[in-house]
Image: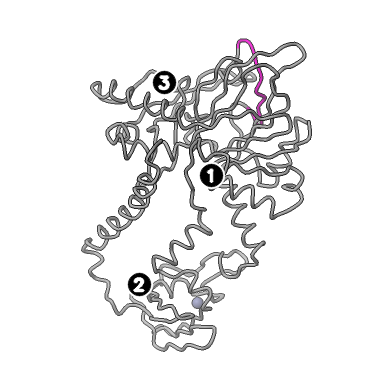
Amino acid sequence: MFALRVISSAKNFAKSVPNISFIKQIHNNKVLHKNKTDDFIDLIIRGESLQFPYVWLRENCQCEECYHSSAQSRILDWSKFDLNVKPKDVSKDQNCLRVTWDDGHSSQYNYNWLKFRGFTPENQKNYSETIYKPKQIAWHTENFEKIFSKHDYSEILSSNEALYNWLYKLSVYGVALIQNTPDSDTAVDAVVNKIGFTKRTHYGVKFVVRQLPNTSNVAYLSSNLQMHTDLPYYEYCPGVNLLHCLVQTASQGGENMLSDCHYTAEYMRVNHPEQYSLLTNIEVEWRDVGVEDGNEFFKLHRAPVICLDRYGEITRINFSIPQRGSHFPMPIELVKPWYEAHSMFLALNQKFAAKFKTKAGDILTFNNIRLLHGRNAYEDNENNVRQLIGAYVDWDEIYSRLRCLKVKLNNEDGIC
Ligand SMILES: [Zn+2]
């Protein structure tokens, strides 16, 4: 239906080009011309040729004077640090590089430790994708079934492998389902505790999603809930949404819709570059004003719908029709084109969305700054009141737990 292959190769191209141009930009900077090619130690570690700058080696000396091992922190005194430090003597044995510097200080470095910190593009990519953050893989409705992983509640609580597997899938695909959760409004707490703690918002530590008249939030209505991200008006926006289904509606409707904005945005970048540019460059104002549990709130945050980093990679999606303010911080002539781009973005997300219905005992977990989610209208009756318990967790806590688990499970040395 769509040119998937074109999109994926364009994505690879986009991933490599900004990096190269960024590095070229740095190398064209006159400051860098001071760097001499002989300011490195050359090593061959397990057949791989690697170079390490003197200044970096000296700064990363692992001795007690330079590095506090229990705090795992550098403690060298920068006021005495010589940027032009040179080795006086270098020796290599089977496992270690030993350097005596021209100030008389001695350092030694394990080869595994060095290799893991190698400056080659391959070593840096390996580190970025295995420890820094797992590489995200975009999806759409046609391959959703394949990427939508199912995890068992009790296994997540009892096994580090199961916990890692769930968080890994969640980070790569932005969505994963936990099944067989006990029928209790505190059941989600145990899962959150395995990661760390919740992100509290003005809707509470946790929140109950059910139909409420005179509500403070449109999510508490049973009518169609248009696709959105939660709380885009927070500068520190919750990263992951956990929705525990306690009671699902027996009526028609109530289906969840989820779409991967990484796929939609890439589709727009390739096929509709002008609209993509409007959504990535123009800041709009996200807003939530009201009272919850007696606490007043007036939240505002300005950001584009699609936020990019310096490499053109998506860092965050903001999208909510009810929670975008009427103040438009943009030139008047851009207003209508922005609405057109916004409309196209929503239509494409609806087109690429997966649709399914969770059941009692499911916890739907998804990346709130990557996916749009929504729900079809439904009808409660006196014996069947749809009810979900929701909680948020930040990506900082999830990535941190993933890294801790990776070290533990792989028994990896020298990666911290
Ligand atoms: Zn030292």
Q: Main secondary structure of the magenta part?
A: loop
Q: What element carries label 3?
A: loop
- Alpha carbon of mark 3 to alpha carbon of mark 2: how far? 50 Å
In the drawing, does residue 131 fall left or right of residue 177? Answer: left
In the drawing, does residue 206 fall left or right of residue 301? Answer: right
Q: Residue 83, which numbered label?
A: 2
> Which quadrant would the C terminus be assigned to in this image?
bottom right
Question: The disc labelled 2 sits on which kind of residue?
Answer: Leu
Residue 208 among magenta residues: yes
* Of the image marks 3 and 2, the number of the one nearer the N terminus: 2
Residue for point 53% across, 59% down: 131
Work out which residue is located at the far front of the displayed protein and give it. 1
Residue 209 among magenta residues: yes
Q: Is 290 in front, or is 190?
A: 190
Q: What stretch is highlighted in magenta?
A: 204-214
> Which quadrant would the N terminus be assigned to in this image?
top left
Residue identified by numbered label 3: 325
Residue for point 68% across, 41% down: 192
Residue 120, position in %: x, y? 39, 69
Q: Mark 3: give few (<14), some (14-19) or many (20+) Cα within 10 Å.
A: some
Residue 81, position in %: x, y? 40, 72
Q: Residue 107, which numbered label?
A: none
Q: In this view, does 84 lie above or below 227?
A: below
* Of the image marks 3 and 1, the number of the one nearer the N terminus: 1
Camera-near label (3 vs 1) is 1
Q: In this view, does 327 lie above or below 91?
A: above
Q: Is mark 2 on a helix, strand or loop?
A: loop
Which picture quadrant has residue 16?
A: bottom left
Q: Mark 1: give few (<14), some (14-19) or many (20+) Cα within 10 Å.
A: many
Residue identified by numbered label 1: 173
- Alpha carbon of mark 3 to alpha carbon of mark 1: how far? 30 Å
Q: Is mark 1 on a helix, strand or loop?
A: helix
